Image: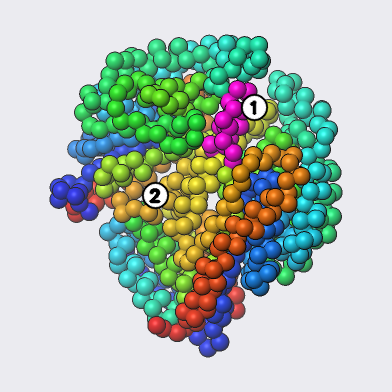
Amino acid sequence: MEIHVERHTTVTVVRIAGSVDGLTADTLLAALQAEVDGGHVRLVGDLSAVDYTSSAGLRALLATVKQARQKGGDFRLAGAVPQVSRVLEMSGFTSILKMYEEVEVALASFGS
Amino acid sequence: MSAADGGAPRVALVIGAGSVKCAAALGLWRVLKREGIDIDLVVGCSGGSIYAGVMALGLGVEECEEMTHGLWRREITERADWRSMLGALFPKLFGFNGRLGMVHDAPLLKALSTPFGGRDFAETKIPLHVVATDLANGEQVTLSEGSILNAIRASVAIPYVWQPWKVGERWLLDGCLSAPLPVDVAMREGADLILAMGFESPYPRRIRSGTRYAFQINSIYTNNLLRANYAFHNLAHHAEIIPVLPEFGENIGLFDTHKFPYVIEQGERAMEAQLPYLKQLLATA
Amino acid sequence: MSEASSSEAPCARPRVGVVIGSGGLKCAASIGLWRVLRRENIDVDLFVGCSGGSIYAARMALGFEPDEIERDAGELWDAGLPKRFHYPTLIRTLLPWFFRRRRRMGLLNDSPFLDAVGRAVRHSTFEQLKTPLFIMATDLETGERVPISEGSITEAVRASSAIPIWFRPWVIGGRLLVDGGVADPMPVSVAIREGCDIIIAMGFEQPRYDQLGTLLGAAGQVTSISMNNLLRATFAFYNVAHHAEIIPIIPEFDRRIGLGDTHLIHYIVERGERAAEAEVPYLRRLLAARTAAVPAAGETR
């Protein structure tokens, strides 16, 4: 799994590639936590290159959502492929966080 | 990822409600057997309990297929339960005990007795748990001992179709009303790795009658409950849940036994998709 | 949601959301909650309503005072449950084999209800509101949740109140909508997604049918089981998924409340007020603590 961070004016895009699962969750969480701790609390997770996600992986994503929100920001997701979308839906994520098809739309959702 | 005793992770299989689609669990099982991966614990709800039961009893995959084939025949729902229906419509005249079932359960019981007649939970090769719902208070009831036939008959008691079934002191209904995909049972029993095979109720394409409408509403409740439960347990525990969700490109009706090979194949496919990650997890344990 | 970037002043006050779940006539208890919030001067940033709760969430968002809402509550309910059945639909529903190609079935005639709702919300649209409002409905054909936050508030309330079998489904934007409670009876989900920190959620369990001696009783029991389990499961999930605090307000009733018991409204409101009052001390502490503790975006600890 690879993580690539991209700074925009007031929002940070975190591009994740590979599998978000029990074996990679700790790495992902550490990277995302570093962003939040660094004051970058308006985050978009680009999931278009994520091919797999499991329970433990979802917990890492949600932990970041919570941390960002606690600091007045948010973590929004974009570009999930169908099989990942399906798991996100079944796990209730689509009801409690904002998900978009395109990263651009997710970025715009934070307002100016 | 390791079990409390430091050994290999306890792998559990949970087969959720889904009537005939639950046969996909046989496809899952075929793949695991081929890979030499053992299941340590099995949990079933509603239709899923039938497959959980035959697997726990140690029957081979082919035997299971044969045994369970016989269950999905029109005969099991053809005999109406007039007594029950009349009682419900005219309670003062016929007396109504609050337990409605439109279909007589004698054919169902006969079909279930072939694989499960006289078999007890204590006989299973691996622990088996069957989930039903308490009619009086709606709570989830996990059955882990006594007669397997009784437990499964209770778990498949679809509301309005078959009458509720008494186990011990309680009247029980279809497990899907409280836990359509009972991963919590697997967690409570100490599983570290849970293969969760769930099926969403199909939505009828056109709602043309009152009864279709009622079933639609029921389906919506069940699907949403399945997701809500799954979502909660997903977050609340440390166990790794691997969802195995077969996709069916077409509608699988209750008696479409000719579609069995397709259903089983979709189960295989769904398990194959999760296999790489599963093997990784087992290897790093 | 804080829009502050590191160069702007921090928006420190926590966002408060109020969610009123489904519960038939018991939802009038939310008027008691509203009374308490107004009295304590607690500002609300977001309202979410579902099913029976949707009309109250709407009126709160519109800025009506608690006394006004209580005064009209009885009238609205009586309009919603007319004495007359919609006989053509009733017959069609009960005789499915005569039934052809109709998607919208309901036993009750809903036009008095629709009129009453329209008057109650002054025919307003979501866009006219100062405080955001979301009303939860369910797509009958896909089972999906449909949170409505645009267009006519009357239509949204009508869709959300479309209790299956009793009321016909309602069409909005080409989708056939029914009671939001079938998918999400107490939609805390929306409040979480919209970034609320403190969520005050009022919900109700369906009554248990001890008298199972009739068909309606037996059918009611199955529905109650489904709805209650869904309510509990979704709430459990929201609890673990939310980053801050959800305060559930569950009024206690010492008598059975049927859909037609509009004479009990004052009692119901009072129960709601009592339940809400009990949470005020904790709510105050939460608001005070978070106001102090929430750092601005861009600041580090």
Residue occupied by mark 2: B233
Label 1 to label 2: alpha-carbon separation: 34 Å
Residue drawn at point x = 30 percent, y = 57 percent: A22
**SS state under label 1:** helix
At which x and y percent is residue A70? 46, 72
**Camera-side residue of C257 and C60:** C257
Residue drawn at point x = 37 percent, y = 62 percent: A60
At label 1, which amino acid type do we have? Leu
* Residue B157, above or below C27: above
Give the left or right position of residue C123, taking residue B156 as reference: right
Question: Which part of the image, by quadrant, shows the C terminus of chain C?
Answer: bottom left
Q: Is C164 covered by the magenta stretch? A: no
At which x and y percent is residue C18? 62, 62
- To which chain does the residue with label 2 belong? B
**Camera-side residue of C109 and C78:** C78
At which x and y percent is residue B172? 45, 27
Numbered circle sitting on residue C93: none
- To which chain does the residue with label 1 belong? C
